[in-house]
Image (spheres, rainbow, N blue to C red):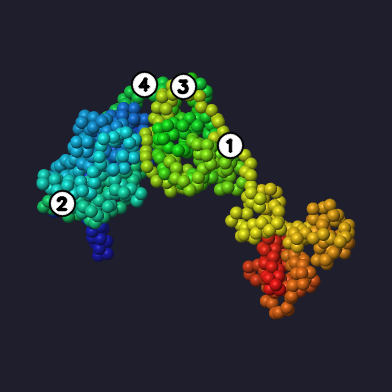
Amino acid sequence: MNKKRIFSFLIALVLVFSVLVLPTESLATSDQKVVTILHTNDVHGNAIEDEGGGKLGYAKLKTFVDSKPGALLLDAGDVLHGTTFATISQGDSMISLMEQVGYKAMVPGNHDYNYGSKRLVELANGSSIDVLQSNVVDSSGKTILPANKIYEVNGVKVGVFGLATPETKTKSNPLNTEGLTFTNYISEARAQVIDLEAQGAEVIVGLVHLGLDDASVERSNLLAEAVPQIDLLIDGHSHTVISEPMLANGVLIAQTGDHLKNVGEVTLVVNNGKVETKTSRLHTYEELKGLTPNAEILAEIATIQEENKPYLEKVVGSTSVELDGVREHVRAGETNFGNLLTDAMLDISGADVALTNGGGIRASISAGNITMGQILEAFPFTNYPVVLEISGANILKALEYGLDSAPEVVGKFPHVGGMTFKYDVIQPAGSRVFDLMVKGQPIDLEKTYKLVTNDFMAIGGDGYEVLKEGKKIAEYPLLSEVLANYISKLKTVSPKVEGRITQGTKALEPGTFNDIKGHWAEEYILAGVENGFFKGMTDMTFEPDTNITRGMLVTTLYRLEGQPKATTTKSFPDVVAEDWYGPAVIWAAENKIVEGYEDGTFKPNQEVSREEMATILSRYIQHKNYPITKIAVAEFEDEAMISSWAAYNVDVMQITKVMNGKPGNVFDPQGKATRAELSKVIFELDNLLNAEVEKAA
């Protein structure tokens, strides 16, 4: 009987799991139809699998798409530009592969305009892929590309319309969209819904390159809130990975991240022309990497790579000097290659200043002719220049960050154009940069400047978080392209190290030390220095946590007293008037503020315990005839550790509140007194005596 029950239970489990693994189509009733939509976005020319980068590539994507017969494959933009593979043919290589993979439609992203609007239209007209865009019109008010298209998927009419981001005006070279107007995206979306429904669409899909970045004015979530008649938004632009279904006002929003690291799949269940259920999921590279790549796509990629060789061997100009891209050089100091690159960035952008990271320069180029292949070897990454509006204060913070570990060899080391500065590695991190000049003038920390940097750093890459405070106002083609075009324009380049970035010694204001910022005693130290009670251990350091000596303590009291002249020159055998502490010790001994040891010496260089400091301070207070009224004082937990000769003086410190105990209600009588502690007690002592003078007056 038990065996039968167990067998019945196992049969039930088998039936349950059989239901769970049935195709999605089987979940629909006879009146329902299932629509499957596959999608990608922000591929940026990454057509080739990159296992290390987790990028699937088109060959394996084709295999995956073929496993989903009848699915509608869409791309949400920024696909035609971003790698050498894509840019050599000005996007044609990507379009060709996308056709083979099976894409039905795409919307142009801002970087799909990088070859100019005419080239985009040319690619669209020559392709079987529908490039949809409803909100971009020319000077006559006509759209330059089709606005929408209806596709039949599993017997369902799916209407798709395209929307491009108005940020294309600034996030591609402005010349690329010259003469074009981006109409209101929400108004256009409403018009597209009406048009598609009139054409009989049962499902409305917005194929949009808008994104979800809060810094963008036009966003897909705002579109969903405004136009709930849209069933689905296939989105791009912000490189957002939406791993779980995201609904906004009932509209499903889907986005896959970037670079073919994920493939999106949306499932819609439609009943009698209405969408009943909608869901989405991501297929990650880890999930799909085991797929067998499509042989035809691989062969096409190999052919394109062979065709690219003449481009890579093309001479763009020459250099009369070696362009220094040695790792240990570009990550530790100014180089002529860094200067050439930042000059090229300034040239294309017209920005005030340029900033890029040494880690982005990967190889040197020898004197002689320069090929495109050499430039790509030196700049293999797909970074591009962006212009930020940013304050002078944040430019300074960025440079301070880039130099906080100097002279270590680090990728974040800054290379600059349009500005010069010096830095002092002796100073603490955050206080090293000085003499920062922009176009020959001292930087104005309150002024807003135009800074051109690379897109990686602009979003906080290499730790440049402060650059995220800037407002992005423009983007340009790949750094490698910008540099190649700049060299081509000049024909021959001869960059040199010209002192844009130099090491030096930072001059400090009197009383300014590089080791007290943020210290608990900073306020007391600065007050003591300002009043002339203290000096630094060096011109640049105070050494707040260094233990004080008897000579230091007495000299500080002597300065507090106004450095009076003693009536004698005699004191102790180990002290003479010519010593730096000599006059102070002679004065203190004459006024019975200090006493010598049993052997008659003063021991001026001996470190001072806290109970010794309390005793000398107490004697000074008595010397000043300050009235001491004996009152009950709280006992310290280590009261028994206080020497009998110091007990009264420790009480005086409590009564006058000149010197306190330590956390845990201990006095730590034998603990060594530090320069920071001395700065605090002198501050309190000065206030105490000044208050008494005012009271007497």
Crowding at mark 2 (Cα within 10 Å: few <14, some 14-19, many 20+): many
Residue 49, by quadrant, is top left
Q: Which is more N-terminal, label 2 or label 1? A: 2
Residue 389, by quadrant, is top left
Q: Amino acid at mark 2?
A: Val
Can the viewer see residue 404? Answer: yes
Q: Amino acid at mark 3?
A: Thr
Question: In the drawing, what numbered circle is on residue 502?
Answer: 1
Question: How far apart are the two marked residues, 2 and 3, measured between alpha carbons?
Answer: 64 Å
Residue that label 4 marks = 310
Determine whether, in the image, residue 475 is placed left or right of residue 466: left
Question: How far apart are the two marked residues, 4 and 2, measured between alpha carbons?
Answer: 52 Å
Residue that label 2 marks = 270
Q: Which is more N-terminal, label 2 or label 4? A: 2
Question: How far apart are the two marked residues, 1 and 2, measured between alpha carbons?
Answer: 68 Å
Q: Which is more N-terminal, label 1 or label 4? A: 4
Q: Which image quadrant: the C terminus?
A: bottom right
Q: Amino acid at mark 1?
A: Thr
Determine whether, in the image, residue 274 is placed left or right of residue 578: left
Question: Residue at point 33% right, 45% down?
Answer: 238
Question: In the drawing, what numbered circle is on residue 276?
Answer: none
Q: Amino acid at mark 4?
A: Pro
